[in-house]
């Protein structure tokens, strides 16, 4: 049986799917009409009953998050949509916003009504200018059609939506750093508590939700909680976008119920390229511990992936075949995390820098026998001690790769270099550049 469930992606192949006309022709904006016909508390309850969990990585129950807002006090409260998608391998929200921005905006309207918000913000990663422009146009169309603005559909509900482009910082995917950036400050994580539900944007109660989470709301309101729970597993209900990239014949977005396995997804994606063998993969982006072919049948839901030693995260399934050097892959990820560390806390700022240097040293053949212990010790001094999850996530590929492929690391050290041909792992023909030499401080 084909496990695909095209719901978020159902209209992506429609003619000019991003326009309001195409969205309405496909049944769009019915969810808002149904929501406005009932009390806001009932909308919150149906989302709670559905079991929808945040699709941004942590998997926190969405309806419960909405319920954390304190009782109205006459002041403003805000919805902020986290569209700062930027982790290596994660690529589901950007195509969703490109192909169906009206779906997100309808979700914003319903969510805002449910939580008593009259001004919502969509924070988009600054580099994706094409997405920013498409969202601006979609919001403009929604205003013109009366789905945003004053007295929406005669309900007395008012809502303004602001699309904000960030300056391009991975740290702004962390919700409190995003809020600081939205306020015009430097994007750095805040000390918690207070949590955003109590004191978020402009020190007011705020809900911060991922794009996919908010875009899932219209169908839940339209079809009901039981319909949503009919997909997925008991504790990980519903559907989600699984992003397959790397050494797979047909990479792309595969929308399926939570609990689908990589084996099933690979069958639909044509398998590993060239008939090669799967070597390792990430279940939720580069900040999640690696899996191997031994995990092909692990159900991709929050509980099963956690029980197997990793995290479902954003369902960014990066596939690597046997031609890939795991040291090289982890080293490139660490280049990213060291570069994107905001520098606010010492464990992450200093730790990611030295992880980067040691990994590069091992890759280029200058590693020492003690380097693996130093890597693990450095990770131990970052994990649980960093100000936010960036530091913790940066340690995941390092510790898991050493646990799974220690012999490969040792071969780089004893063989004084990488035994792999980097061009063999490439998806296109290229001439590898000579890697810059790593610092040798600390090598004995």
Image (tube, rainbow, N blue to C red):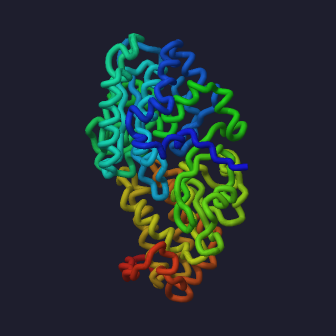
Relative horizontal placement of residue 331, taking residue 256 as reference (left or right): left
Residue 253 in the image, given as x and y percentages of width and height: 53, 52
Q: Tell me which residue sits at (43%, 18%) in the image.
A: 116
Query: Which one is nearer the viewer's eye here, 364 or 129?
Result: 129
Q: Is residue 59 above or below residue 40?
A: below
Q: Tell me which residue sits at (68%, 40%) in the image.
A: 232
Query: Which one is nearer the viewer's eye here, 67 or 223?
Result: 223
Relative horizontal placement of residue 22, taking residue 44 as reference (left or right): left
Query: Which one is nearer the viewer's eye here, 403 or 112?
Result: 112
Residue 182 location, quadrant: top left
Q: Is residue 207 above or below residue 152?
A: below
Query: Which one is nearer the viewer's eye here, 344 or 229?
Result: 229
Residue 317 location, quadrant: bottom right
Residue 169 in the image, given as x and y percentages of width and height: 34, 51
Q: Tell me which residue sits at (44%, 40%) in the image.
A: 100
Q: Is residue 112 above or below residue 304?
A: above
Residue 32 visible, this angle: yes
Residue 412 in the image, given as x and y percentages of width and height: 54, 83
Residue 442 in the image, given as x and y percentages of width and height: 43, 76
State how many labels appear.
0
Q: Residue furthest left?
A: 184
Residue 383 visible, this angle: no
Q: Tell me which residue sits at (38%, 77%) in the image.
A: 439
Q: Residue furthest bottom?
A: 415
């Amino acid at each position: 049986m084909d496990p695909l469930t095209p719901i978020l992606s159902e209209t992506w192949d429609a003619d000019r799917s991003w326009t309001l006309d195409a969205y309405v022709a496909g049944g769009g904006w019915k969810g808002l009409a149904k929501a406005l016909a009932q009390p806001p508390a009932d909308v919150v309850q149906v989302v709670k009953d559905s079991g929808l969990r945040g699709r941004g990585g942590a998997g926190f129950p969405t309806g419960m998050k909405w319920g954390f807002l304190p009782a109205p006090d006459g002041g403003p409260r805000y919805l902020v949509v986290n569209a700062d998608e930027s982790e290596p391998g994660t690529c589901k929200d950007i195509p969703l916003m490109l192909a169906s921005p009206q779906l997100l905006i309808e979700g914003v309207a319903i969510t805002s009504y449910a939580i008593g918000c009259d001004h919502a913000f969509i924070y988009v990663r600054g580099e994706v200018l094409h997405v920013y422009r498409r969202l601006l146009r979609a919001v403009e169309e929604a205003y013109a059609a009366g789905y945003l603005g004053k007295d929406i559909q005669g309900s007395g509900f008012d809502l303004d939506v602001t699309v904000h482009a960030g300056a391009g910082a991975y740290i702004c995917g962390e919700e409190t750093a995003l809020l600081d950036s939205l306020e015009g400050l430097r994007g750095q994580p805040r000390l918690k508590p207070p949590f955003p539900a109590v004191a978020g944007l402009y020190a007011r109660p705020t809900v911060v939700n991922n794009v996919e989470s908010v875009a899932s709301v219209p169908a839940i309101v339209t079809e009901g909680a039981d319909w949503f729970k009919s997909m997925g597993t008991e504790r990980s209900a519903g559907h989600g976008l699984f992003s397959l990239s790397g050494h797979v014949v047909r990479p792309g977005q595969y929308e399926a119920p939570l609990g689908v396995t990589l084996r099933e997804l690979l069958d639909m994606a044509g398998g590993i390229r060239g008939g090669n063998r799967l070597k390792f993969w990430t279940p939720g982006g580069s900040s999640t511990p690696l899996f191997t072919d031994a995990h092909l049948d692990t159900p991709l839901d929050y509980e099963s992936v956690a029980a197997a030693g990793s995290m479902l995260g954003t369902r960014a399934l990066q596939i690597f075949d046997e031609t890939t050097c795991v040291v090289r892959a982890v080293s490139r990820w660490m280049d990213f995390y060291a570069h994107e560390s905001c520098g606010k806390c010492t464990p992450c700022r200093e730790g990611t820098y030295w992880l980067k240097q040691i990994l590069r040293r091992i890759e280029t053949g200058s590693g020492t026998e003690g380097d693996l212990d130093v890597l693990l010790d450095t990770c131990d001094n970052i994990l649980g001690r960093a100000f936010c999850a960036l530091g913790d996530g940066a340690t995941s590929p390092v510790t898991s790769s050493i646990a799974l492929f220690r012999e490969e690391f040792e071969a780089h050290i004893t063989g004084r270099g990488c035994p792999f041909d980097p061009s063999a792992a490439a998806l296109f023909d290229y001439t590898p550049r000579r890697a810059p030499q790593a610092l040798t401080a600390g090598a004995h």
